Image (spheres, rainbow, N blue to C red):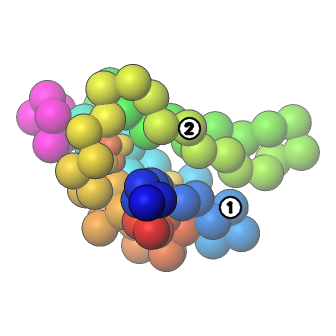
Amino acid sequence: MSQKRIIFVPENCRICRTCQFMCSFHHFHEFNPSKAFIRIYEDEEGNPHAEILDGCDSCLKCVESCPYGALRYE
Ligand code: SF4
Ligand code: SF4
């Protein structure tokens, strides 16, 4: 049985950081991207990447809040 996971679609990501803001607000009541359990970063070519960190509880606030459809759960 396969486990669901958060899928990142880099073509859709605009690096707006809404996902990070919502994650940190959900867990710490702070809009502080550095406290989020999802990290969005750009590589040297400016391409976006996402990393889910230890501590993520699969609350899916990040997926629900992404305005550009760059996060899915499947
Ligand atoms: S994944 Fe969505 S919410 Fe997060 S930075 Fe990219 S576009 Fe914004
Ligand atoms: S699913 Fe994980 S990364 Fe996304 S908002 Fe919840 S704790 Fe943060």
Residue at 47 percent of width and 59 percent of height:
2
Q: Quadrant of the C terminus?
A: bottom left
Q: Would you say 57 lies left or right of 2 here? A: left
x and y percent of residue 39 in the render?
Answer: 50, 36
Q: Nearer the viewer, residue 6 or 32?
A: 6
| Residue 33 can be seen, yes or no | no
Amino acid type at image mark 2: Glu
Residue at 41 percent of width and 65 percent of height:
73
Q: Nearer the viewer, residue 28 or 37?
A: 37
Check disc 2: other Cα within 10 Å, few if <14, some if 14-19, many if 20+.
Answer: few
Q: Nearer the viewer, residue 20 or 57?
A: 57
Q: Nearer the viewer, residue 39 or 6?
A: 6
x and y percent of residue 52 in the render?
Answer: 48, 37
Residue 27 located within the stretch drawn in magenta? yes
| Residue 61 can be seen, yes or no | yes
Residue at 31 percent of width and 65 percent of height:
65
Badge 1 residue CB within 8 Å of ligand 1: no
Q: Main secondary structure of the magenta part?
A: helix
x and y percent of residue 56 in the render?
Answer: 32, 35
Question: Based on the displayed image, in which of its 4 quarters is residue 53 positioned?
Answer: top left
Question: Which residue reaches farthest right?
Answer: 45
Label ID, residue 51: 2
Amino acid type at image mark 1: Pro
The residue that label 1 is drawn on is: 10
The image shows residue 9, relative to residue 56, as above or below, that is below
Q: Quadrant of the N terminus?
A: bottom left
Q: Secondary structure at mark 1?
A: helix
Quadrant where ligand 2 appears? top left
Which range of residues does the magenta coloring cover? Answer: 25-30
**Gap in Å between the C-alphas at discs 2 and 1?**
12 Å
Q: Secondary structure at mark 2?
A: strand
